[in-house]
Image (tube, rainbow, N blue to C red):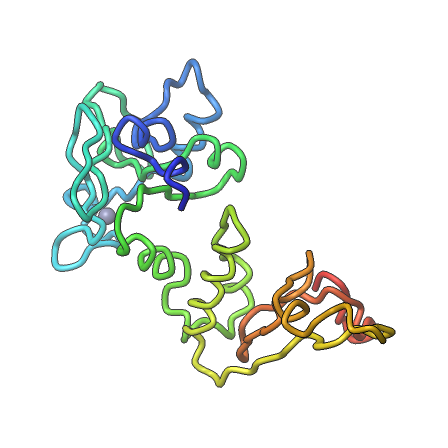
Amino acid sequence: MDSSSKLSGPDDFDKYISAELPDEKKYPLLHKLVCKYMMHGPCGVLNRNCGCMQDGACCFRYPKQFSETTEQEKDAYPIYRRRNDGHKVFVRKKWLDNRWIVPYNPTLLMRYNCHINVEVSSSIKGCKYLYKYVFSDLATNCTSISYMRERAILSTRNEYVDSLNAVMIGKFLENEKVYYSHDSVDDDSTNNYHLNFLNSITPNGLPPHELKIKKNCHVILLRNLDPHHGLCNGT
Ligand SMILES: [Zn+2]
């Protein structure tokens, strides 16, 4: 990532990530969405039967500790600001405070209106967690249309998409198939378009020169291949 795009420390983290209840009067809709999507549990002493409980404790380590400020931990997630400001909300039959809030980005939460956990990733562990969190138990679930349809990893740049795709394809169990793009251009009698050039480009909306896919991985059609059987552009 470009150094100017990186979050440099706790002050930056606070600009993009919150783990507190927003002011209900100033931000009523955001407050409602945090209560609806971003409250963990309740688990632990409030509910020992919660699905996150393992050996008597929450596997996600909720409730978190109160903290006056956000602090950077080495090779781990930061400790997010969760002030003990007396704010509580009644969620799933219990009163919950800032210790139960899953870190979120207000803009993403408002835009997509669903549970989106946003964390600062300062180590390689973060990337591994991303795959594990979004596509848990992929090998078992990859044939389930609803499982695959409900998940996505968004990325800001095409190059990140390519590297994420490469890792994800590696996680499917079946044999890999490789498809190549064209090596020549029709009517190019003077050889203006060299093989290396043609193989290096990825025109907008087309697959890369070397397309690797496996059985059960998702692909989107970009042409009407067989409309009679539902194979249309965009499916
Ligand atoms: Zn829990």
Quarter containing the C terminus: bottom right
Residue 194 vertical position relative to residue 2 in the rendered view, above or below = below
Which of 143/197 is in front? 197
For the point 51% across and 82% down, which residue is it?
176
Q: Is residue 234 found left or right of 112 in the rendered image?
A: right
x, y (%) of residue 12? 32, 29
Q: How many marks?
A: 0
Q: Residue furthest right?
A: 187
Which of 195/127 is in front? 195
For the point 19% across and 50% down, which residue is it?
58
Residue 109 vertical position relative to residue 165 in the rendered view, above or below = above
x, y (%) of residue 73? 17, 40
x, y (%) of residue 94? 26, 35
Q: Is residue 227 found left or right of 179 in the rendered image?
A: right
For the point 41% across and 37% down, which residue is it?
5
x, y (%) of residue 214? 53, 78
